[in-house]
Image (cartoon, rainbow, N blue to C red):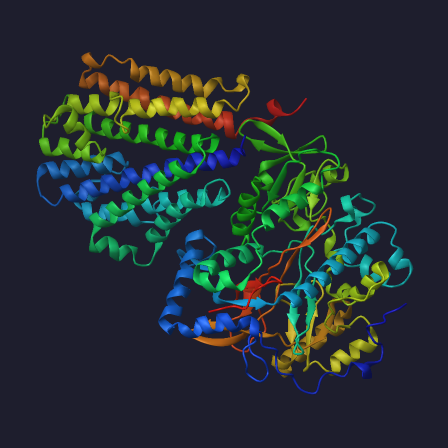
């Protein structure tokens, strides 16, 4: 068995002596403003604190008016809150984006090939590149998907990878989100908002447009059925209005011109899927589902699910409808499989990964387990199955008691845990209480894959609004900001 | 062709916004009239509260408190705040089907109604508060009219508006004139306020001058062809929009609501208005309200909750 990039020798895993200083998106280590931030910096400097605050209010009002909110229920009343959104865009120069784009394309191509292989011949398991039991025992592995035809081998049609920028300035992949990634509506809404808040700077900066995302998504979804239906009916399947990402589901449906359906709108008859319309039943060809695998079909997956539609999976198996993303993609973004992605890329494409992984220790390997247990105070430990910042231990910030409790949990079920060095997220300037202050950010670009792979030149930049915090998840007090990807021929920017 | 659930939601948005607007007007007229402590003011309060189905004597005696609850009480599913919340909740469920301009208007009204300062704004100036909501609801309807395609979804929205409107005006007239023979209403103030509750005072004056009489009010609010809140006007729109949305349904299945709406429209169009008596009007109103309820049920059965067996492909 080859685990080339994951050393079995614990000595080789020595963590860094001290936490390095994070990379700042705007300022060099010497405190100078990077050239691609110069225009924004001088524009912001020219505005008084009150003007900035006024723009921040305009921005928040835009989100509130659009209904880009979540509801906080408390007592007998409920209030609408917006997801905190920062005024200042994060800027990525063209050459850096070129690397990101190439790296993400390569990665998704390889992961789709991996999924096609896992749910087909399983050659990669026979060759011992990825441990067989790691894949086949993963909860996200769907036996039902075995030997099922997926057009273009595009299993993950919409992928939202989480990237971080390391202290040396290089981007690395923290997580591949191949299941039902969300956040793209924030990318689009943040862009709408920042065009209003910094129109002049935006115009002269040469920012690449993101507004084609909805039609590219529609084209991607249609390409999944084009073989057998000339003008396929595409729908967006949402769990409903109480889902926290409901705004996004409605937004994408509206911009694609596709009906937004719920499970109760669908009927399966003779292995065909129909929606209930005012004029009777209308056949559906492609379902962009924003419902997790477990809930799409109570006959095949969770029996207690009321969100999906009975018989959907059989219709899919029969080839009468396409489910996007395909069920079972989670096996390739599993936190343990993650460690093998560079190997997977090499195996299928014969290339080195353009975007590196974060160093990852698998607790299922005894040597790595003992290293993890010995260095709990320096590592971040994550439960393989969990996401959204839950089920994790941030070693340096945890108390001795918390670490001890977590150590027991790891020892009880080592297969379920991986560990990574405490990563340092880069920082970007944010407007906090009327002042500019750096906060940690990550980067979630969105990659579409159908007949071809397309990376939208933009991303959701998530912000940890609490000073010093590294947790960017919106469920835990994170916010977001617009991300400007500059085009190649951007002229020198005049403020 | 649109999702049955979506059609249902659009229909209910129409009903809820119309209901909210009507109740704002009732509350406003009631508060204004009861500033005078006269017998006719008490009658206005009785009519307004009876029209919303809550003629509790204690409430009639305390019109301000009644109006406050009618406006802002979220516990009461019939309040203006609840109606607007329901309209907005339905709009959220079909957010992909209505234009951003339309959504923004409704969302704004909702945010204002549920903002922490709403109670204070009402206390500081109930008339201005209610007036602003009515104006905003007009903006909502205007935005919908100006930005949404006037197709099927629009048809369901307006079906809701006009069916609700016909029922609200019908109920208001029923409450006013039900006991007309035993307790004739001749009070000028009271009659003027009934016209205000229907947003009909100015158009009425232009048509009949300041000669305000129960029979003419009935004639105007039931049978006027051009006044947008007359029952005849609403039933003509109901028939028109039902014909519109039925275009998309196979001929076999849409006999029900269209036929009912056509009959109701004809009933108002060809009524013997010259010989209308107050007594006859009461019976007529009951028929109209019953037929509106039947149309509502038929819409639901034809477009939303139809049986699947009939519609499965062969």
Quarter of the rendering containing residue A197: bottom left
Residue visible at 73% across and 67% down?
A355
| A416 relative to A201 in the view: left or right | right
Q: Is residue B213 visible?
A: no
Residue A9 versus residue B118 in the image, above or below:
below
Quarter of the rendering containing residue B137: top left
| B93 relative to A47 in the view: left or right | right
* Residue extending farthest bottom: A17
Q: How many labels does the image show?
A: 0
Residue B144: percent from left, percent from top:
39, 38
Residue visible at 48% across and 73% down?
A41
| B192 relative to A43 in the view: left or right | left
Return the residue nearer the eye: B162 or A463: A463
Q: Is residue B42 visible?
A: yes
Return the residue nearer the eye: B127 or A324: A324
Return the residue nearer the eye: A372 or A350: A350
Residue B174: percent from left, percent from top:
24, 26
Return the residue nearer the eye: B209 or A35: A35
Residue B25: percent from left, percent from top:
24, 40
| A407 relative to A204 in the view: left or right | right
Residue visible at 66% across and 68% down?
A96
Residue A414: percent from left, percent from top:
77, 70
């Amino acid at each position: 068995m080859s685990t080339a990039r994951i050393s079995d020798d614990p000595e080789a895993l020595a963590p860094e002596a001290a936490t390095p200083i994070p990379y700042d998106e705007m300022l060099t280590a010497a405190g100078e403003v990077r050239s691609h931030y110069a225009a924004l910096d001088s524009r912001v400097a020219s505005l008084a604190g009150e003007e900035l605050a006024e723009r921040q209010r305009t921005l928040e009002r835009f989100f509130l008016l659009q209904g880009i909110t979540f509801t906080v229920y408390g007592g007998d009343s409920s209030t609408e809150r917006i997801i905190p959104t920062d005024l200042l865009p994060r800027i990525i120069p063209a050459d850096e984006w070129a690397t990101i784009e190439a790296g993400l394309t390569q990665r998704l191509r390889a992961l789709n090939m991996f999924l096609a292989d896992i749910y087909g011949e399983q050659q990669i398991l026979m060759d011992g590149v990825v441990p067989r039991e790691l894949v086949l025992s993963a909860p996200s592995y769907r036996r039902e998907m075995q030997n099922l035809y997926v057009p273009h081998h595009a299993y993950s049609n919409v992928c939202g990878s989480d990237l971080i920028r390391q202290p040396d300035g290089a981007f690395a992949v923290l997580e591949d989100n191949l299941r039902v990634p969300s956040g793209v509506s924030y990318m689009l809404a943040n862009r709408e908002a920042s065009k209003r808040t910094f129109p002049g700077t935006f115009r002269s900066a040469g920012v690449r447009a993101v507004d084609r995302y909805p039609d590219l998504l529609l084209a991607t979804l249609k390409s999944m059925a084009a073989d057998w239906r000339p003008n396929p009916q595409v729908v967006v399947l949402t769990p409903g209005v109480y889902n926290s990402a409901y705004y996004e589901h409605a937004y994408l449906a509206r911009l694609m011109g596709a009906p937004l359906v719920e499970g109760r709108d669908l009927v399966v008859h003779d292995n065909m899927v129909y929606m209930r319309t005012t004029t009777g039943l209308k056949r559906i060809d492609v379902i962009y589902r924003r419902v997790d695998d477990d809930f799409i079909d109570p006959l095949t997956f969770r029996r207690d699910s009321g969100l999906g539609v009975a018989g959907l999976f059989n219709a899919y198996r029969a080839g009468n409808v396409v489910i996007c993303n395909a069920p079972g993609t989670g096996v390739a973004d599993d936190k343990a499989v993650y460690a093998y992605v560079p190997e997977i890329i090499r195996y299928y494409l014969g290339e080195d990964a353009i975007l590196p992984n974060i160093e990852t220790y698998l607790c299922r390997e005894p040597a790595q387990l003992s290293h993890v247990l010995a260095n709990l105070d320096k590592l971040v430990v994550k439960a393989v199955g969990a996401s959204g910042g839950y089920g994790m231990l941030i070693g340096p910030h945890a108390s001795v008691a918390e670490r001890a409790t977590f150590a027991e949990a790891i020892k009880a079920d080592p297969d379920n845990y991986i560990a990574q060095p405490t990563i340092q997220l880069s920082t970007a300037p944010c407007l906090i209480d009327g002042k500019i202050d750096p906060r940690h950010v990550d980067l979630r670009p969105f990659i579409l894959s159908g007949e071809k792979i397309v990376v939208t030149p933009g991303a959701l930049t998530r912000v940890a609004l609490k000073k010093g915090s590294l947790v960017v998840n919106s469920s835990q007090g994170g916010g977001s900001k617009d991300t400007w990807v500059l085009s190649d021929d951007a002229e020198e920017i005049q403020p | 062709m649109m999702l049955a659930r979506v059609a249902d939601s659009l229909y209910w948005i129409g009903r809820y916004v119309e209901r909210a607007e009507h109740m704002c007007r009732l509350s406003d007229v009631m508060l204004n009239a009861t500033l005078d402590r006269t017998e006719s003011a008490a009658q206005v309060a009785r009519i307004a509260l009876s029209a919303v189905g809550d003629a509790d004597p204690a409430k009639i005696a305390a019109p301000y408190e009644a109006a406050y609850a009618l406006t802002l009480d979220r516990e009461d599913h019939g309040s203006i705040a609840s109606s607007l919340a329901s309209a907005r909740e339905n709009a959220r469920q079909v957010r992909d089907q209505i234009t951003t301009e339309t959504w923004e208007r409704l969302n704004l009204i909702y945010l204002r109604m549920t903002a922490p300062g709403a109670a204070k704004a009402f206390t500081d100036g109930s008339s201005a508060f209610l007036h602003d909501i009515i104006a905003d609801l007009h903006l909502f309807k205007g935005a919908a009219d100006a930005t949404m395609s006037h197709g099927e979804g629009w048809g369901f929205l307006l079906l809701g508006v006009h069916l609700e409107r016909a029922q609200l005006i019908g109920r208001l007239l029923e409450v006013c004139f039900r006991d007309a023979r035993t307790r004739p209403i001749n009070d000028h103030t009271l009659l003027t306020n009934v016209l205000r509750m229907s947003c009909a005072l100015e158009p009425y004056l232009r048509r009949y001058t300041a000669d305000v009489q129960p029979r003419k009010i009935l004639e105007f609010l039931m049978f006027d062809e051009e006044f947008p809140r007359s029952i005849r006007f609403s039933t003509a729109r109901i028939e028109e929009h039902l014909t519109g949305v039925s275009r998309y349904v196979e001929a076999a299945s849409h006999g029900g609501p269209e036929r009912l709406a056509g009959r109701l429209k004809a009933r108002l169009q060809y009524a013997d208005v010259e010989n209308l008596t107050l007594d006859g009007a009461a019976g007529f109103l009951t028929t109209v309200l019953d037929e509106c309820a039947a149309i509502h049920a038929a819409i639901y059965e034809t477009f939303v909750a139809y049986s699947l067996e009939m519609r499965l492909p062969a």
